[in-house]
Image (spheres, rainbow, N blue to C red):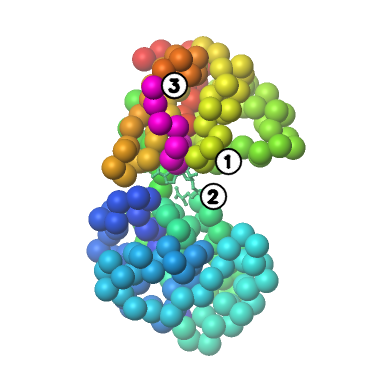
């Protein structure tokens, strides 16, 4: 019976990939990816040449029956995303769900994910945390922030290039005294971590480059560094 491998790939530094991930990508018949241009960079780097099949947020549900047929008819497939672990704020979970329902074995090949990496270097409590991913951009955002303000565990958020300042202003309003770690461009050339309360981080922001990818970690209420 063929299998679906869920393979974690680097989040910025191409060397951050496991031997097993490379062996798996080399061994399968088909690589299911988000964007062939992004995955091709990784495959070329490791001299892997395989057919690719695109699923993304728009077409994942529509493509599932075709992919399940392919796996059921004997093709071993690897699922990757543009960066990090598939299904974590990335496409894939609906395919995995369909594979499970169809009795297909799903094997995870572990590796990088921005959430675990950021937590591990934050210096903030990691014994219990809530991962919120991206906050909704408009509808429901304020409600989400109000609810999170009552959360007692460490909170992890994802944010992309152009909205970090807006998010920090909101954190200053809803989480004024909390310790925060903003992890920017992890594993990449301009990797850095900003630490402090939201207002401390905001006051230093004009000297900083705010472009990049971010993980924001918010400590529980009573935590002090
Ligand atoms: N599947 C990925 C994972 O396992 O982390 C997450 C994909 S999600 C579409 C992309 C978001 O993850 C970015 O907007 C950012 O919030 C976070 N992220 C990904 N790579 C990052 C990096 N190198 N440094 C900081 N944050 C990163």
Is 212 rendered above or below residue 84? Answer: above
Sequence-wise first label, 1 or 3: 1
Magenta range is: 207-215
Residue that numbered label 1 is attached to:
134
Query: How far apart, in angstroms, are the residues tagged by discs 1 and 3?
Result: 24 Å
Q: Quadrant of the C terminus?
A: top left
Specify whether tag 1 is near ligand 1 (CB below 8 Å). Answer: yes
Cβ atoms under marks 2 and 3 closer than 8 Å: no
Cβ atoms under marks 2 and 1 closer than 8 Å: yes
Q: Is residue 173 left or right of residue 53?
A: right
Sort mark 1 into few (<14), some (14-19) or many (20+) by Cα contacts within 10 Å: some
Query: How far apart, in angstroms, are the residues tagged by discs 2 and 1?
Result: 8 Å
The image shows residue 158 at horizontal and vertical percentages of 51, 39
Q: Which residue occupies the foreground of this view, 133 or 5? A: 133
Specify whether tag 3 is near ligand 1 (CB below 8 Å). Answer: no
Is any part of residue 79 visible from this angle?
Answer: no
In percent of the image, x 61 and y 16: which residue is there? 173
The image shows residue 56 at horizontal and vertical percentages of 58, 63
The image shows residue 205 at horizontal and vertical percentages of 44, 22
Q: Which residue occupies the foreground of this view, 39 or 89? A: 39
Secondary structure, magenta segment, majority class: loop
In percent of the image, x 62 and y 66: which residue is there? 60
Q: Is residue 89 left or right of residue 25?
A: right
Is any part of residue 34 visible from this angle?
Answer: yes
Is 125 rendered above or below residue 172? Answer: below
In percent of the image, x 56 and y 34: which residue is there? 163
Residue 135 occupies quadrant: top right
Specify whether tag 2 is near ligand 1 (CB below 8 Å). Answer: yes
In the picture, the disc for residue 89 is: 2
Looking at the rendered structure, the secondary structure element under dot 1 is strand
In the picture, the disc for residue 206 is: 3
Sequence-wise first label, 2 or 1: 2
């Amino acid at each position: 019976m063929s299998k679906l491998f869920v393979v974690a790939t680097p989040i910025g530094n191409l060397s951050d990939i496991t031997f097993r991930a490379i062996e798996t990508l080399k061994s399968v018949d088909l690589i299911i990816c988000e964007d062939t241009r992004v995955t091709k960079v990784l495959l070329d780097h490791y001299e892997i040449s395989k057919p690719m099949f695109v699923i993304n947020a728009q077409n994942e549900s529509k493509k599932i029956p075709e992919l399940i047929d392919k796996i059921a008819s004997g093709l071993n497939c690897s699922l990757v995303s543009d960066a990090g672990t598939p299904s974590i704020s990335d496409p894939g979970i609906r395919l995995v769900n369909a594979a499970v329902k169809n009795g297909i074995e799903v094997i995870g090949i572990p590796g990088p994910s921005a959430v675990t990496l950021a937590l591990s270097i934050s210096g903030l409590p990691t014994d219990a945390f809530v991962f919120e991913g991206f906050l909704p951009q408009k509808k429901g955002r304020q409600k989400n922030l109000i609810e999170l303000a009552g959360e007692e565990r460490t909170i992890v958020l994802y944010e992309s290039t152009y909205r970090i300042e807006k998010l920090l202003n909101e954190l200053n309003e809803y989480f004024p005294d909390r310790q925060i770690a903003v992890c920017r461009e992890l594993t990449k050339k301009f990797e850095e971590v900003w630490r402090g309360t939201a207002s401390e981080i905001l006051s230093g922001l004009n000297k900083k480059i705010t472009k990049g990818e971010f993980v924001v970690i918010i400590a529980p209420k009573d935590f002090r560094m």
